[in-house]
Structure formats: structure tokens, C-alpha cells
Image (spheres, grey):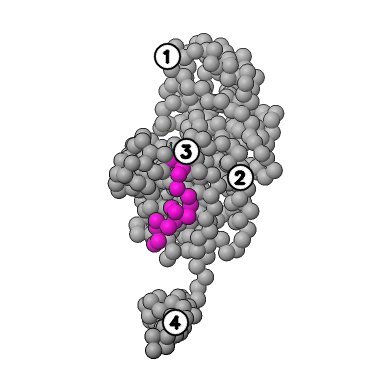
């Protein structure tokens, strides 16, 4: 008798799973029209690179953890709500503290996204990343990806084992944004604590807060609420399909060093960096200024020198420059100016000062 009950139950289960969506979903969807049920969901590719979002530490604690520990699959498993948004393909690109990010990993990310973006099934991409250098990876990809499909970076300030870990909601919102029509053609975006940022203007501005990401005077360009995208602005500087930078076939980038000026800053550091780099970026004081000693050395250099500021907000233009052979970073932070200079030198190692000036006005 038991055997017949088991066979009967197996048949019922089999029939339920053969009906698309299974028994539970089937009954919920009973009122839906056919077009909605049959609509293709599309795929979001999640590229995991590590960071605090994949960090593990002492239960409840927010410090002293190891970033880049959990895999992409485990991160996704922790947010089952994502299943309702899109089909997911998870790729573990690396699993590092983002202070160990490299140009080689950037090139792998660019190559992977550029290749997979041709797949019509793929709607968008999410990159999980440590917050320390997220702004650099985002800006690099913003200048080198050849797609208008959404590419969204996210991370966390609290490890997965902390009380009120912020990673799961950030990951959910990133997938929703990457699957959205609103994010198409906006360049590389960042979603963090419900806010949407454009790659060029976003930076990390707090060492501890869950609101650690901001965009200074430019501000965020949108807001996420319960998975819904509310976008208000579009980035106006050149990016992705309009960008002239093509990194296909490259396996590394030219070396650009960033020098931070402070009172009595050792001119020897500047000389050393100039001898061992293809270009320099100076994080000057105020509107990109530095001492008379530094002016003398910089005046004598023949490699490109871009002048940025150690201050977060503000602009540096040609009229601010202390040395005629330098290029103004405009509003780019020193670390982002270094990326644009590396790409410019990769395209043309002999690039002229005029052409560099033009690039820093366009990107
Ligand atoms: N240093 C770590 C990283 O960038 C922690 C910062 C974070 O992920 O929030 O990977």
C-alpha cells in the first residue's frame, strides 16, 4: 500500500514540476496573462573580485575581518531575492582585498565584459569589489568597455559576518540596476546604500560609514528603492562606446606614479618617481600647488605630469598651473587622473601635451 502512495506522490510532484514554474508559482501566476509568463528574463553576469562584501570575521564585528573570502556563489546564495530579478551567471575573477587590484585584473574584467556583452541573452553585469579602489576600477572600465549594456559595481563596508551587514542589499540593488532599461547607455555605474553613482564622479569618502561612497559636488545620479531604479541625471563626459581607448590585446598598462605633496615633501621622492615612471600625477595642495623645490624639478621633467589636488572637491584648470609643461586634471582625483594618463600613454607613448590637455577636458 505504502508503495502505491509513494508512486502517486512522485507522479503528482513530477506533474507539478513539468508545469512551468512549479506548483507554488503556477498557482500564484494563475491570474497572469501568457505574455508576462513567457517573457524572457535575461541574464545578469556577476563578476566577483573580493573585498569586504566577501569578507569574513568574528561574528558581529565590523573590523579585523579578512576581505575576499566568500565566493560569488555563496554571496548570491545569501540573497535569494535575486532569483526573481534575472538569471545569474557567476564568475569568480579573483578574490582579493581591493588594495591588491592590478591593471592585469582590470584588463581581464574589460576583456570578459566586452566578450560577453555580445551575447543577446546578457542584459547587464555586476562587479562585486572592495570599496578602497572601487572608484579606480569603475573609471577604468568606464573608459574601456565597448558596450552600452549596464555595468554596475557594488561592495560593502561591513563584512558578511557583521551585524547589519550591508552587502546583501547592495548586491540585490546592483543586480536590479544591471537588469534595468534605465541603466542602458549610462556608462559604468556604482550602487551603494540605495544611491546610484556615475563612475567618473564617485569616490570613497569615509573609512567606516555604510554611506562611504559619494560623488562630492556632482552628487549621486539616482536612487534605488525596493529594486526600482529612479534615475535623475546622465553622465555627460565621454565613456564606453564613445571612448577612444581600446585595451583589447594589452596585457599591462604604462606605469604612472602619484606623488602626494605636503609641507617639506622630500624632492628626492619626486626625482625617483620621475626616473622610474612613464608619467606622473601630482596630488598638489589647494588648486594643485607645491613648493619651489618641487617646481624646479617638475620644470625639468620630460615625461607627462598631470596636476590634481589632494582636496576632494574642486577643479584645476590650465590657469592654475605653476609649471608650463604640466596638464590640469580638471576635476579628476589623482588616482583617476593616473588612469586616464595610463590609457593615453598606452594608446600613444609619444602623446603631445596638447592632445593630453584635450583628453583631460573630454573624459
Ligand atoms: N580593504 C578592503 C577592500 O577594499 C576593505 C574595504 C572594502 O571592501 O570595503 O577590499
Which part of the image, by quadrant, shows the N terminus? bottom left
Mark 2 near mark 1, Cβ–Cβ under 8 Å?
no
Q: Secondary structure at mark 1?
A: loop
Q: Classify mark 3 as within 8 Å of ligand 1 or not, answering yes or no.
A: yes
What residue sits 66% from the left and 39% below the top? 251
Q: Which residue is mark 4?
A: 10
Instruction: Report the magenta residues as a range.
Output: 67-81
Q: Position of residue 202 (x, y in %)?
A: 44, 41
Q: Is residue 35 magenta?
A: no
Q: Which residue is mark 3?
A: 97
Mark 4 near mark 3, Cβ–Cβ under 8 Å?
no
Q: Is residue 78 magenta?
A: yes
Above or below, 60 relative to 124: above
Mark 4 vs mark 3, CA separation in Å: 48 Å
Mark 2 vs mark 1, CA separation in Å: 39 Å
Q: Quadrant of residue 280?
A: top right
Mark 3 vs mark 1, CA separation in Å: 31 Å
Q: Which residue is mark 2?
A: 108
Above or below, 142 relative to 12: above
The image quadrant in which ligand 1 is located: top left
Q: Nearer the viewer, mark 4 or mark 1?
A: 4
Q: Secondary structure at mark 4?
A: helix
Amino acid at each position: 500500500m505504502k508503495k502505491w502512495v509513494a508512486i502517486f506522490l512522485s507522479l503528482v510532484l513530477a506533474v507539478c514540476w513539468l508545469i512551468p514554474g512549479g506548483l507554488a508559482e503556477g498557482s500564484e501566476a494563475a491570474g497572469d496573462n501568457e505574455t508576462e509568463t513567457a517573457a524572457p528574463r535575461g541574464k545578469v553576469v556577476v563578476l566577483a573580485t573580493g573585498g569586504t562584501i566577501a569578507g569574513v570575521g568574528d561574528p558581529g564585528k565590523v573590523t579585523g575581518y579578512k576581505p575576499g573570502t566568500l565566493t560569488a556563489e555563496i554571496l548570491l546564495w545569501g540573497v535569494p531575492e535575486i532569483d526573481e530579478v534575472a538569471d545569474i551567471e557567476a564568475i569568480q575573477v579573483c578574490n582579493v582585498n581591493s588594495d591588491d587590484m592590478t591593471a592585469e585584473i582590470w584588463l581581464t574584467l574589460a576583456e570578459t565584459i566586452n566578450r560577453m556583452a555580445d551575447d543577446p541573452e546578457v542584459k547587464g553585469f555586476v562587479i562585486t569589489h572592495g570599496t578602497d579602489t572601487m572608484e579606480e576600477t569603475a573609471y577604468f572600465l568606464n573608459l574601456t568597455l565597448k558596450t552600452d549594456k549596464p555595468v554596475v559595481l557594488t561592495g560593502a563596508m561591513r563584512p558578511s559576518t557583521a551585524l547589519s551587514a550591508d552587502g546583501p542589499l547592495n548586491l540585490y540593488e546592483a543586480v536590479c540596476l544591471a537588469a534595468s532599461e534605465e541603466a542602458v547607455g549610462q556608462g559604468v555605474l556604482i550602487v551603494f546604500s540605495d544611491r546610484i553613482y556615475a563612475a567618473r564622479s564617485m569616490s570613497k569618502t569615509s573609512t567606516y560609514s555604510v554611506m562611504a561612497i559619494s560623488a562630492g559636488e556632482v552628487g549621486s545620479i539616482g536612487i534605488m528603492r525596493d529594486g526600482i531604479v529612479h534615475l535623475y541625471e546622465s553622465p555627460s563626459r565621454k565613456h564606453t562606446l564613445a571612448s577612444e581607448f581600446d585595451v583589447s590585446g594589452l596585457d599591462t598598462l604604462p606605469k604612472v606614479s602619484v606623488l602626494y605633496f605636503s609641507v617639506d615633501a622630500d624632492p628626492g621622492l619626486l626625482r625617483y618617481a620621475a626616473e622610474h615612471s612613464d608619467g606622473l600625477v601630482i596630488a598638489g595642495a589647494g588648486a594643485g600647488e607645491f613648493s619651489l623645490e618641487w617646481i624646479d624639478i617638475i620644470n625639468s621633467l620630460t615625461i607627462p605630469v598631470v596636476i590634481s589636488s589632494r582636496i576632494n572637491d574642486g577643479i584645476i584648470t590650465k590657469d592654475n598651473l605653476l609649471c608650463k609643461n604640466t596638464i590640469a586634471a580638471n576635476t579628476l582625483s589623482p588616482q583617476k587622473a593616473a588612469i586616464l594618463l595610463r590609457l593615453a600613454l598606452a594608446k600613444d607613448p609619444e602623446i603631445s601635451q596638447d592632445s593630453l590637455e584635450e583628453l583631460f577636458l573630454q573624459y
